[in-house]
Image: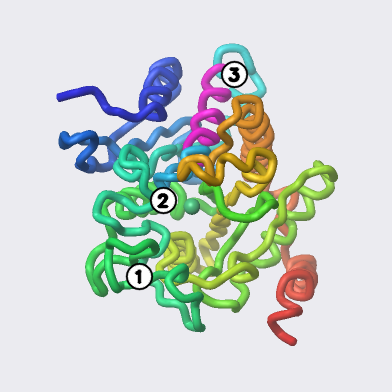
Amino acid sequence: MTPPAMPELAELQPIIAAGGAHLQQRAVCEVMCEVAGGVQRFPVLAVTLGNPSLDVPAVGFFGGVHGLERIGAEVVIAHLHSLVMRLRWDSSLHRQLESLRLVFMPIVNPGGMAQATRANPNGVDLMRNAPVDASEPVPFMVGGQRRSNRLPWYRGVAGAAMEAENLAVCEVVEQELLPRPFSMVVDCHSGFGTRDRVWFPYAHTAQPIPHLAELFAFKAILDQTHPQHRYVVEPQSCQYLAHGDLWDHLYQRALLSSTNQAPRTFLALTLEMGSWLWVKKNPRQLFSRHGIFNPLIEHRRQRVLRRHVAWLDFVMRAALSHRRWVPTDAAREAAHAQALSHWYVKAAA
Ligand SMILES: [Zn+2]
């Protein structure tokens, strides 16, 4: 068998090896696809580190869900690389990991990345494939379609099981994140637009989620700590609605597993890096399918990685310290009301 034709996987493997006994890795599933005239097999890898106890908070970092958006996988790999190097000298990181669990799935859709397609090798868009139907009208095609897997945004066959890559994500999230009192995920994508956006559920309805107060408090500590940050934090429904969103599905699973005796907070964030920033500065990128979603110029790529890796580190510290900023009781009710008027006032009008 020829070696995997994918630079991201080749980059990831030595990083995992350098982590030594601090890291655990497993191939949650394998996908087969045709690349350069031959069939290749790629693992969907999950890497874990930190305290495995289900009492401590956790963060999951996901990338490469859409095969064309390579920069998403690169940001997650760069973050893991930085942590692995810090494990050699940074005692503050070791102390963090005594009370924190981290999960990495940097290349969720290796077949799509190898074939340079948004969808997986079956032509399914993994972010339209979960068993969640939008309760309000979605944009034509973009919101998810079941006409053909040769068209973009294909959801898969109605009633069929989710694609193997999504089942792998669900397995890892349900084992590692949902059983905990507090967990967060960041799923890294690159999207259209000029702003870097941090989306949270829902995508299938314009209704607010029950954990709006927690997200408003998260935005507040981000705004206070990094007043110069460039992220627009908002519900995905502010931009567009879609069928089959995987994070809506997993958020709803988290709600089902939450009880009064054992409340669960699961905050699912999607980082949508604004790729028009790159196109605007380098219009030639418009003529390259890879270039629309990824910064082609090296110094720009470095800047993108630097900025977002710093933000992923912020998310880690926020999860670790959640008890200091997640509002309770009357403060939670007040934050919920403020969040409604901040994000949903237009929807209510
Ligand atoms: Zn994407």
Tell me the residue at 56%/13% (across/down). 88
Q: Secondary structure at mark 1?
A: loop
Q: What stretch of residues is rendered in magenta?
A: 72-85
Q: Work out how far the residue at label 1 is from the one at label 2, CA to CA, in angstroms.
A: 16 Å
Question: What numbered label is drawn on residue 173?
Answer: 2
Q: Which color scheme is applied?
A: rainbow
Question: What numbered label is drawn on residue 131?
Answer: 1
* Outermost residue, bottom side: 349
**279 or 304: nearer the viewer:** 279
Question: What numbered label is drawn on residue 86?
Answer: 3
Please tell me which of labels 1 and 2 falls first in the chain: 1
**278 or 28: nearer the viewer:** 278
Task: Look at the image and tell me in which quarter the N terminus lies.
Answer: top left
Place of residue 234 in the rendered image (x, y in percent of width and height, measured from the top left): 67, 62
Camera-near label (3 vs 1) is: 1
Q: Magenta includes 96?
A: no
- The answer to which image quadrant residue 57 occupies is top right
Q: Work out how far the residue at label 2 is from the one at label 3, CA to CA, in angstroms.
A: 25 Å
Callout 1 amino acid = Pro
Please tell me which of labels 2 and 3 falls first in the chain: 3
Tell me the residue at 64%/18% (across/down). 91
Q: How dense is the environment of label 3, judged by Cα within 10 Å: few (below 14), some, or many (20 and up)? A: some
Q: Work out how far the residue at label 3 is from the one at label 1, CA to CA, in angstroms.
A: 40 Å
Place of residue 82 in the rendered image (x, y in percent of width and height, measured from the top left): 57, 23
